[in-house]
Image (cartoon, helix red, strand yellow):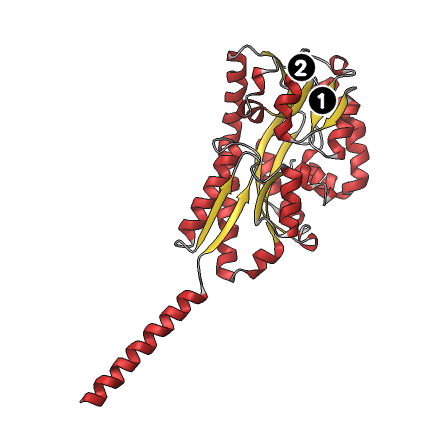
Amino acid sequence: MRLTKIFVAGIIFAAFTAITTTAVAQPTVKLRLGHVTTAVSIAGQGAQAFAKAAKEISNGGIEIEVFPNSQLGGELEMLSQVRLGTLDIAMNGAGIVAAIEPTFSITELPFIWKNRDTVWATLTGPIGSKLLGSLEPKGIKGLSWGVWDFRGFLMNGTAINTPADMKGKKIRIIENPLYVRTIQALGASPVPMAWPEVYTGLQQRTIDGVETNYHGMSDAKLFEVAKNLAVTDHIFTATVYLMNMKKFSSLSPAHQDFVLKAARVAGETMRAGAAKANEDAIALMEKNGVKVTRPDRASFEKATEPVIKYFSTIVGPDLVQQVINSQK
């Protein structure tokens, strides 16, 4: 009888040890995610949705700590950090990602998109998947797409109605050759500048205006120092959730699936709120004394035609045509 008790106790101990060992072998995966805007912005909402979904889908197996407000650096800095492996995940504008993979410029070509729905259908289809996959040889796993929506110009001294009104003006842009050529085609002088520096740049008049999405302008309170908004909708900004490839590969297949699903939730969250957020932002800026103009797009489209022609040789004319055909 005593031997039987010892035998049973031994089995229970062995089973407990096995369970404990399994638990230790699969600790909670902790990841860091950075973005440049506030926690309440479209990007902030997407990042929080990412963290929440990852935790829920994995039953607490994945915890993501979110760092908003450029706490970990500007977009280019975080892109570099993800590539090096010093940051797990970043949310970047596609135009920034084009710094390491030029084909991502396709999403930013001026006036190439018909509307928000065709953008999303294209990015979440075969074309978008192919673009995300092109990052893997560069040490980055493209997890999913998000959106910042359409862009315009916020100026600190000039109302914009035609490209002629932009002649000689210093316009802050993201650090991307496509944006350089787009602004030059409109007759202005492009000034690459990190997002955290824009408010001061407008305030001190080192730049005359900024080119970005409307919610970003409002979120950063740029309307406090710039009072003329041109709603041009010339570029639609897609965003990308990026993860260090080695870190992603180190996860179990189940955890990889959880991360990918959570990233898609993040993108859908951004998409669901972007249109309204940008319209609300325009209304808020107008309420705060900003003069809003809605220029005729025809003259802007004509002026930027050479930009599409030039970048077709970089991203590939076939890819450009695929994007155009995907919207028919």
Marking on residue 295:
2
What is the quadrant of residue 79 in the picture? top right
Vertical comparison of 247 with 24: above or below: above
- Residue 58, position as x, y percentages in the image: 42, 54
- Residue 121, position as x, y percentages in the image: 58, 40
Vertical comparison of 137 with 91: above or below: below
Q: Reading the chain from its start, which is encountered first: label 2 or label 1?
A: 1
**Mark 1 residue element:** strand
Looking at the image, residue 88 sits to the left or right of residue 321; the answer is: left
- Residue sitting nearer the eye, 318 or 30: 30
- Separation of marks 2 and 1 at Cα, in angstroms: 17 Å
- Residue 130, position as x, y percentages in the image: 66, 49
Vertical comparison of 177 with 144: above or below: above
Name the residue: 50% across, 17% down.
284
Looking at the image, residue 314 sits to the left or right of residue 108; the answer is: right
Can residue 66 be seen here? The reply is: yes
Marking on residue 66:
none
Looking at the image, residue 105 sits to the left or right of residue 35; the answer is: right
Can residue 154 be seen here? The reply is: no
**Mark 2 residue element:** loop
- Residue sitting nearer the eye, 139 or 257: 139
Name the residue: 51% across, 62% down.
252
Name the residue: 26% across, 80% down.
9
Q: Which amino acid lies under the numbered mark 1 shown in the image of this protein?
A: Ile
Q: Which amino acid lies under the numbered mark 2 shown in the image of this protein?
A: Pro
Q: Residues within 10 Å of mark 1 (few under 14, many from 20)?
A: many
Label pair 2/1, CB-CB below 8 angstroms: no
Circle 1 residue: 171
In which quadrant of the rendered image does the N terminus lie?
bottom left
What is the quadrant of residue 26 in the picture? bottom left
- Residue 307, position as x, y percentages in the image: 78, 30
